[in-house]
Image: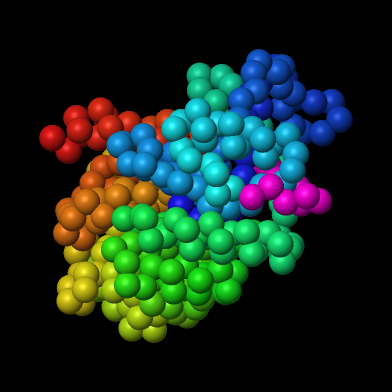
Amino acid sequence: MVGDLCLDEYIVGRAERLSREAPVPVLEFTRRFTVPGAACNPALNLQAVGGKATVVGVVGDDEPGAIVRRSLQEAGIDTTAIVAESGRATIVKTRVLAEHLFPQQVARVDRQERGPLSRRTAAALEAHLTAWVPKADGVLLSDYRSGVLNQALVKHVIAAARGTKALVTVDSQGSFAKFKGVDLLRCNREEAAGFLGRQLVGDAGYLQAGLALQKRLGARLVAITRGGEGLTVIDGEGEGHHIPASNRSEVYDVTGAGDTVIAMLTLALCAGAPLFEAAQIASVAAGQVVRKLGNATVTREELEGLVG
């Protein structure tokens, strides 16, 4: 698992009244909790259903960074390849939730770090990747566009995976060009439309978009998530499959649904599943996590119960 790491912070309070100072709710604090976010979330999903994840990424040499590493370790994830860069702040995303019948997000504050990595940090990441990629069944690149997955590091991953059994999969937020030659690219409809410069309409539109991405990026497989419409996948023969959403009515929080999709796709493909079957599993898993609050994961027991 390679990518941008962050700490997701949730501050929850009961909505008591409107402020006299501005038309906003006044919340009486009830609780605060944190979970590892961004590229940590697919790793947690992988681990929760029986995979074995190692995270390669960067945090700051600070308390939020220490919390990220400790939380991942408690989940059984290997954190020895996480580099703490002095002078770099760990990304923290704070969500404020108003609690009534159920918590509702009313505000979000991001403490973002998008600066380039130091040469020492970049070299350390490359050394970790050189050591870990040949041992892996898959390498999942999770790009939140916060500086870790730069062109040089992506090229290093692809080169390290060449000639090994490692499947290279990508969850990108629109910066597609640097991921040429990967095994699987996952994106959502807005990202695909922005890159291709056209709207995606209907199954045929998604199929054509997937084929265009496949051709322009040299990706063997493509997956485009479509929100409540499910997802479209294009296999190595250029054949498209449309998988409907497994849950369209009980949607509580869509945070992290894309992370779940790429995690399940990667793990199922590494286990030898064909793309269509992997996409069905991913759809079911995503349908389960949107029933939960925040960056949630699906458990192995839940998944077994849902897919039989």
Q: Which quadrant holds residue 4? A: bottom right
Residue in the picture at 16% in, 59% down: 274
Q: Give the range drawn in magenta.
A: 83-93
Against 142, is 255 above or below?
above
Q: Does the magenta stretch include residue 87?
A: yes
Is residue 250 in view from this perspective? no
Q: Which residue lies furthest to the left in this view?
A: 308
- Where residue 227 appears, as percent x and y from the top left, is 37, 53
Look at 55% across and 26% down and name the residue there: 103
Q: Is residue 212 above or below residue 47?
A: below
Q: Where residue 67 sits in the image (x, y, percent)? A: 64, 32
The spot of residue 222 in percent (x, y) is 32, 68
Is 177 situated above or below 142? below
Q: Nearer the viewer, residue 51 or 92?
A: 51
Q: Position of residue 115 (x, y in %)?
A: 74, 62
Name the side, left or right, on which 48 lies relative to 19. Answer: left
Seen at 25% across and 28% down, the residue is: 301
In the rendered view, does 253 fall on the left or right side of 115? Answer: left
- Indicate left or right for 83 with 289 as reference: right
